[in-house]
Image: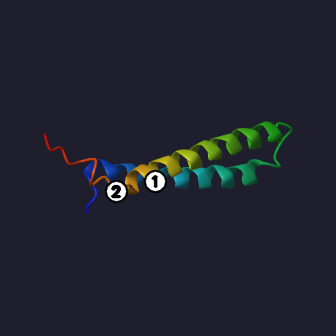
Amino acid sequence: MSKTLSQKITFAIALLCYLAAAGCVVGAFYYGGVGEDSSILKASLGATAFFFFTAGVVLHVIGTARLKGLLQFND
């Protein structure tokens, strides 16, 4: 079954969320040892990476779901 336009858009946003999560992890390692407030920065980037990763998982599931039975409206 082909995916709907909204599922394709949702899947693309999921990939962007995965990319943002990876960027936050890289940023946490890059900026982690610089300055006195590095623990605050690492915690903030870690929480942001976790958010983007979990949002990506949810959107990935929505974007790849089979909606064949849900989209048939036989009244």
Secondary-structure class at tag 2? loop
Label 2 neighbour load within 10 Å: few <14, some 14-19, many 20+:
some
In contact (CB < 8 Å): disc 2 and disc 1: no
Q: Is residue 64 above or below residue 32?
A: below
Q: Nearer the viewer, residue 47 or 54?
A: 54
Alpha-carbon span between mark 2 and mark 1: 12 Å
Q: Amino acid at mark 1?
A: His
Task: Report the residue that reaches farthest toward the left.
Answer: 75
Residue 54: image location, x then y, percent: 57, 47
Label 1 neighbour load within 10 Å: few <14, some 14-19, many 20+:
many
The N terminus lies in which quarter of the figure? bottom left
Residue 31: image location, x then y, percent: 75, 48
Q: Residue at x 24, y 48 (%)?
A: 71
Q: Nearer the viewer, residue 40 or 59?
A: 59
Q: Nearer the viewer, mark 2 or mark 1?
A: 2
Q: Residue at x 83, y 41 (%)?
A: 35
Residue 52: image location, x then y, percent: 57, 45
Q: Which residue is mark 2?
A: 66
Residue 45: image location, x then y, percent: 68, 43
Q: Amino acid at mark 2?
A: Arg
Q: Which residue is mark 1?
A: 60
Task: Report the residue that reaches farthest toward the bottom.
Answer: 1
Q: Earlier in the sequence, mark 2 or mark 1?
A: 1
